[in-house]
């Protein structure tokens, strides 16, 4: 009898929690929060954005389902905003099973409420999904709607609240029943609430989204992330040590331990140091295997000793693991997360979509990114610099932490040498250019060139060379060659070099009376700028520290001499921290019939606080200013 009563009580709790979200409704007469003075001139203001997710997992009773409610209201202050908000589809993702409820209404400035009829709520192009169109919307109207959908449960989810309009009130509720368990991760803007036994999260006055260059865009968003497990055991399996052990028990699709032994024999690693063994192995894998594209069928019948085939992401990881085990090289498997997206949870694996699995060789202080084709064994990927990675020492069977250091600025360096000569018509120029790059940029360009060189469409390769050489100017590529193309050059950070001969299609000069203006600044290529960004909401986060070193030699045409070159001389340096400063410095000198320009630009840190944004902005804009600058020539007076 006790068991029966407990089952009935359990059933009642599940029904109550599931029914509660399905019976959600709005107030007959809405009461909205007053719009703050600073938002009254905004084109639109989101009055509230409420979301509630309930996950039910119980195979014996009611099966599994996820219910989601969204309740949204926006005030339209400018007619230009109507098209952004007057079409609504009750769809969250591809797991939707049914639209359970959908209501919408327009509140006019005088308080009149116009509820959309059921006939105005129609099927969308997606199965089981409803949509609406608010018709006759005018400036000053408030658009309000809510819908409830039923979906298949997902292991995690993301709710982004920040939009291009301010949000006065945001709310998120996560409930579950049956064996479902959950965890919630919020932006700092959200606050935890508990009222009458119910928990939820709220945030007020969320500022409009501003897209800024060199920013941790996703990480900085005001958002909620949540994790769902189907049972306590499943949640326990997400703990790092359990997760790593489970991951290492995986079996590869396309090879066996015996196949890896044959591969190592082929590579002839006898009498090599661990560093040499890993380098040879890494080069073989990175030059003989490619990742499958999304949706491609995995081929399990390949010979890894022959190479030149594709591997699944998991197989890349396990190929290194098997090799390390056979070679008895100590290693740690580590989980890393892109610093532009977020940071790893201290306790458990949360969002596999954001997490990558790498290897760390602690004795050598080097990293391996198994399935990143361009990245050699050595430094961690640029997106993981300065983060804390979660690791598991396979030999010691214990958890660890790994802290990938930030690579110095002289690791990633672009150097160019350009010789510029005016054509006989004094309008266009010929350019002999040597472009060399190291570090992360060199690795990616080397990989891209190799990839494009395999294509039958040679135009892609030509466009790539032109873009790398001088993408600010419309040019004709006359010829080019490359140096140090082999992947092995990544291990010694040998520069990837492109030598090119180009001819400008567009004019490079302007006439002002008897003066001739030559836009030599264009030779350094297209430069981004921060001219429009006067203020800064977020810190500046760069992909990597880096340096640029340019040399431009201009041959002065016969019959002319230099009048002035002042615009090409720029000296800007951030006054911040000697170890982290950035600067741009260009010098000009005239020697015989040549003008010689040198440029040094350096960024010694990957993060700069927004408080010194104006200092940073001056340095960052310097290259764009230089690219617009000209040297002025005048005719030599005849004696």
Image (cartoon, rainbow, N blue to C red):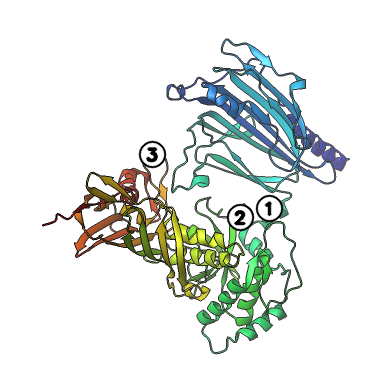
Q: Are marks 3 and 1 in contact (CB under 8 Å)?
A: no
Residue at x 44% of width, y 46% of height: 213
Residue receiving disc 2: 348
Q: Nearer the viewer, residue 188 or 497?
A: 497
Q: Helix or strand or loop: what does disc 1 sit on?
A: helix
Residue receiving disc 1: 235
Q: Nearer the viewer, residue 18 or 450?
A: 450
Residue receiving disc 3: 532
Q: Nearer the viewer, mark 3 or mark 1?
A: 3
Q: Position of residue 507 (x, y in %)?
A: 37, 50
Residue at x 77% of width, y 21% of height: 119
Q: Are marks 1 and 2 in contact (CB under 8 Å)?
A: yes
* Relative to 294, 378 lies left or right: left
The circle on residue 317 is none
Q: Distance from label 3 to label 1 (Cα)?
A: 47 Å
Q: Distance from label 3 to label 2 (Cα)?
A: 42 Å
């Amino acid at each position: 009898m006790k068991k029966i009563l407990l089952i009935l009580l359990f059933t009642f709790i599940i029904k109550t929690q599931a029914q509660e979200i399905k019976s959600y409704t709005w107030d007959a007469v809405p009461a909205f929060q007053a719009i703050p003075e600073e938002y009254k001139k905004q084109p639109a203001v989101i009055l509230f954005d409420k979301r509630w997710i309930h996950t039910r997992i119980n195979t014996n009773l009611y099966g599994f389902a996820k219910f989601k409610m969204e309740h949204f209201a926006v005030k339209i202050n400018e007619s230009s905003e109507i098209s952004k908000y007057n079409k609504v589809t009750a769809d969250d993702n591809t797991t939707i099973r049914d639209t359970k409820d959908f209501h919408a209404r327009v509140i006019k400035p005088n308080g009149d409420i116009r509820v959309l009829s059921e006939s105005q709520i129609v099927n969308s192009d997606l199965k089981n999904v409803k949509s609406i169109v608010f018709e006759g919307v005018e400036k000053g109207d408030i658009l309000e709607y809510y819908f409830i959908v039923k979906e298949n449960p997902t292991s995690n989810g993301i709710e982004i609240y920040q939009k291009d309009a301010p949000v006065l009130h945001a709310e998120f509720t996560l409930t579950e029943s049956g064996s479902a368990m959950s965890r919630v991760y919020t932006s700092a803007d959200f606050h935890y609430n508990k009222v009458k036994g119910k928990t939820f999260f709220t945030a007020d006055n969320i500022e409009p989204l501003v897209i800024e260059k060199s920013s941790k865009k996703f990480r900085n968003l005001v958002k909620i992330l949540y994790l769902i497990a189907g049972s306590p055991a499943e949640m326990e399996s997400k703990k790092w040590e359990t997760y790593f052990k489970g991951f290492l028990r995986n079996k590869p699709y396309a090879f066996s331990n015996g196949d890896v032994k044959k591969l190592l024999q082929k590579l002839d690693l006898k009498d090599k140091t661990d560093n040499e063994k890993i380098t040879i192995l890494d080069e073989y894998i990175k030059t003989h295997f490619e990742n499958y594209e999304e949706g491609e069928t995995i081929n399990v019948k390949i010979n890894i000793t022959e190479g030149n085939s594709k591997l699944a992401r998991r197989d890349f990881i396990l190929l290194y693991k098997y090799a390390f085990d056979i070679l008895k090289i100590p290693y740690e498997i580590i989980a890393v997360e892109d610093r532009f997206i977020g940071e790893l949870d201290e306790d458990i694996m949360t969002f596999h979509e954001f997490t990558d699995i790498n290897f760390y060789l602690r004795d050598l202080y080097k990293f391996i990114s198994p399935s990143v084709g361009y990245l050699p064994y050595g430094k961690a990927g640029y997106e993981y610099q300065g983060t804390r990675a979660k690791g598991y020492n396979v030999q010691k069977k214990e958890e660890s932490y790994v802290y990938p250091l930030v690579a110095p600025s002289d690791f990633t360096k672009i150097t160019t040498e350009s010789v510029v000569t005016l054509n006989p018509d004094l309008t266009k120029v010929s350019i002999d250019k040597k472009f060399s790059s190291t570090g992360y940029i060199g690795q990616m360009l080397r990989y891209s060139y190799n990839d494009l060189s395999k294509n039958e469409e040679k135009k892609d390769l030509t466009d790539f060379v032109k873009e790398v050489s001088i993408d600010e100017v419309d040019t004709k590529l006359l010829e080019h060659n490359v140096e140090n193309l082999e992947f092995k050059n990544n291990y010694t950070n040998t520069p990837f070099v492109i030598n090119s001969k180009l001819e400008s299609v567009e004019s490079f000069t302007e006439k002002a009376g008897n003066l001739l203006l030559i836009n030599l600044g264009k030779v350094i290529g297209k430069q981004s700028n921060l001219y429009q960004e006067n203020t800064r909401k977020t810190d500046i986060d760069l992909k990597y520290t880096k340096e640029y070193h340019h040399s431009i030699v201009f041959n002065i045409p016969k019959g002319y001499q230099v009048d002035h070159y002042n615009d090409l001389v720029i000296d800007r340096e951030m006054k911040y921290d000697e170890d982290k400063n950035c600067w741009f410095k260009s010098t000009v000198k005239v020697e015989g019939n040549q003008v010689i320009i040198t440029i040094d630009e350096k960024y010694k840190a990957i993060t700069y606080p927004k408080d010194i944004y104006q200092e940073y902005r001056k340095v960052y804009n310097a290259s764009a200013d230089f690219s617009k600058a000209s040297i002025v020539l005048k005719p030599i007076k005849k004696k």
